[in-house]
Image (cartoon, rainbow, N blue to C red):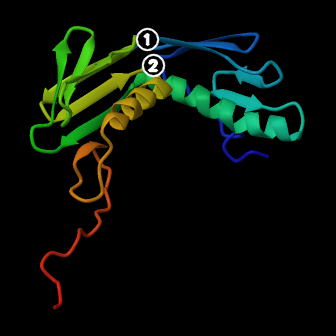
Amino acid sequence: MSQIGRKIINIPDNVNIVNENNNVCIKGNLGELTYQFDKEMKIDISDDGILVSRPSDQKRYKELHGLTRSLINNMIIGVSDGYTKILTLVGTGYTADASKGNFLVLNVGFSHPVYVQKPEGLSIETPETTKIVVKGIDKQLVGQFSARVREIRKPEPYKGKGIRYKDEHVRKKAGKTVGGGAA
């Protein structure tokens, strides 16, 4: 049996869950998330928590078992606490500005500023010019937007310049050796 899938999901006091034909709607103090899960998976909501079970031991259901449990757990955490990703800009003159309407403006070494449209359901802040804070209730949306911003200028391995996650470690390579020519 799935090690993750058989764990019971605890429900916080401020979260309300409705399951209609595996269309799970979760409401919390930060917002509401809805997701349609596979019809074959059994989602039992009780006072103790939520238990996800599968109809048989076929490979397809084994794959869906842990996934369904993880998605429901992520939805509960999202509507109660929320998710945050912090990106830092490393490089001379690299700046970010989220105050320009519905866009995040990045100056990351190109000849022009890069405009990234903010998706619905996310809040993007720039407390410093070299720091971007992405917040939201949907874990997938927060991670996808953060990855999209990072993709604009990935950290390069020689000087480490670029956009990186807050706790990301960039392995640096040694550059060319200078002046070691033998005659």
Disc number for residue 31: 1
Disc number for residue 43: none
Furthest toward the front, the residue is 183
Q: Amino acid at mark 2?
A: Val
Above/below status of 91 relative to 15: below
Q: Residues within 10 Å of mark 1 (few under 14, many from 20)?
A: some
Above/below status of 81 relative to 175: above
Q: Which residue is mark 2?
A: 79
Q: Give residue 69's position: percent from left, percent from top.
A: 65, 32
Q: Is residue 16 left or right of residue 104?
A: right
Furthest toward the left, the residue is 93
**Most foreground residue, 86 or 91:** 91
Q: Residue at x 20, y 40 (%)?
A: 89
**Most foreground residue, 97 or 159:** 159
Q: Residue at x 19, y 24 (%)?
A: 113
Q: Residue at x 73, y 22 (%)?
A: 44
Q: Secondary structure at mark 2?
A: helix
Q: Is residue 59 left or right of residue 116?
A: right
Q: Amino acid at mark 1?
A: Gly
Dividing the picture into quarters, in which one does residue 133 lie?
A: top left
Q: Give residue 85's position: percent from left, percent from top.
A: 33, 34
Q: Is residue 108 left or right of residue 49?
A: left
Dividing the picture into quarters, in which one does residue 176 lie?
A: bottom left
